[in-house]
């Protein structure tokens, strides 16, 4: 049930976003430094963060662009697959919005839908007002942009040994994100193992290795998700519950 009393305010949204803002700053800092380390000018990661706002998509995107071997179709398909989840989150949020939220306001807040913002908004279990979501997403976005700007600016002056360390920061971040769910959920563990096995196959088998990195990422991710869906289907709430 969604509570309609005690409507969420912009102040509540900004307060809820403070932990997200701090976390985004650290991750975006790493992204900015890594992007400069790949050889991009400082303005490139800043423009990317300003127009995309998707951590995993941005990290993968700069890696593919830096490889110089990825084609435009590879990049487009990879971005589509990795960001497809946002459409599902947006459809869920649309069911929780207050009735007075207009169409143009929906377009505005759609840009700020991220995993963390979505989780916090849904956990409120109240009608989501435009002011609340704008403050929540805006505060978190400020942390994301701030981290990107700082990372991009300092990335050009850091010693080479520090830049080398930052080169593994993004992959390490994803490993840190994946490991806790793998320990708690068997389906997640199976999906990750399938993706890792396929990734190793693309790396070590010459025939598969000739395929572009972008296509390999897409195939590994989709195949892992497909295996997970087949082996661990999610049952409907009413299934097996009688009439």
Image: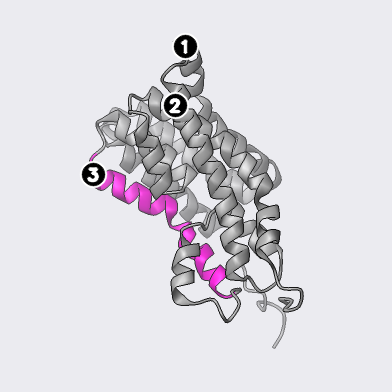
| Overall secondary structure of the magenta section | helix
**CA gap, disc 3 to disc 1?**
33 Å
| Residue occupying image coordinates x 47% and y 16% | 158
Q: In the picture provided, is 156 more to the left or to the right than 76?
A: right
Q: Secondary structure at mark 1?
A: loop
Q: Nearer the viewer, mark 2 or mark 1?
A: 2
Q: Residue furthest right?
A: 6
Which of the two residues, 135 or 204, is positioned nearer the viewer here?
135
Q: Secondary structure at mark 3?
A: helix
Q: Circle 1: is it few (<14), some (14-19), or many (20+) Cα within 10 Å?
A: few
* Residue 71 in picture, x, y percent from top left: 23, 40
Q: Quadrant of the C terminus?
A: bottom right
The residue that mark 2 highlights is 153
* Residue 83 in picture, x, y percent from top left: 43, 53
| Mark closest to the chain's N terminus, 2 or 3 | 3
Q: Is residue 166 above or below residue 170?
A: above
Task: Give the quarter of the image for residue 242.
Answer: bottom right
Q: Which residues are magenta?
A: 71-95
* Residue 233 in picture, x, y percent from top left: 57, 63
Q: Nearer the viewer, mark 3 or mark 1?
A: 1
Number of numbered markers? 3
The residue that mark 3 highlights is 72
Q: Which mark is residue 141?
A: none
Q: Circle 2: is it few (<14), some (14-19), or many (20+) Cα within 10 Å?
A: some
**In magenta stretch: residue 233:** no
| Mark closest to the chain's N terminus, 3 or 1 | 3
The residue that mark 1 highlights is 159
**CA gap, disc 2 to disc 3?**
28 Å
**CA gap, disc 2 to disc 1?**
13 Å
* Residue 169 in picture, x, y percent from top left: 52, 27
């Amino acid at each position: 049930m969604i509570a309609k009393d005690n409507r969420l305010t912009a102040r509540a949204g900004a307060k809820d976003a403070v932990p997200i803002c701090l976390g985004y700053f650290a991750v975006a800092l790493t992204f900015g430094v890594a992007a400069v380390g790949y050889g991009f000018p400082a303005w490139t990661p800043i423009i990317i963060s300003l127009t995309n706002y998707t951590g995993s998509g941005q990290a993968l995107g700069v890696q593919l662009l830096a490889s110089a071997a990825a084609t435009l179709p590879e990049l487009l398909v990879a971005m589509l697959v990795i960001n497809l989840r946002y459409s599902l989150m947006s459809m869920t949020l649309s069911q929780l919005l207050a009735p007075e939220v207009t169409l143009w306001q929906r377009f505005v807040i759609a840009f700020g839908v991220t995993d963390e913002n979505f989780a916090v908004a849904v956990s409120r279990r109240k009608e989501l007002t435009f002011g609340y979501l704008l403050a929540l997403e805006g505060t978190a976005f400020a942390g994301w942009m701030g981290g990107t700007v700082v990372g991009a600016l300092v990335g050009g002056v850091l010693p080479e040994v520090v830049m080398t360390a930052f080169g593994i920061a993004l992959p390490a971040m994803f490993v840190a994100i994946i490991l806790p769910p793998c320990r708690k959920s068997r389906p997640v563990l199976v999906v990750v193992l399938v993706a890792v096995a396929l990734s190793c196959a693309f790396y070590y088998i010459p025939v598969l290795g000739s395929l572009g990195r972008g296509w390999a990422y897409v195939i590994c991710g989709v195949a892992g998700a497909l295996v997970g869906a087949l082996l661990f289907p999610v049952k409907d709430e009413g299934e097996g519950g009688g009439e």
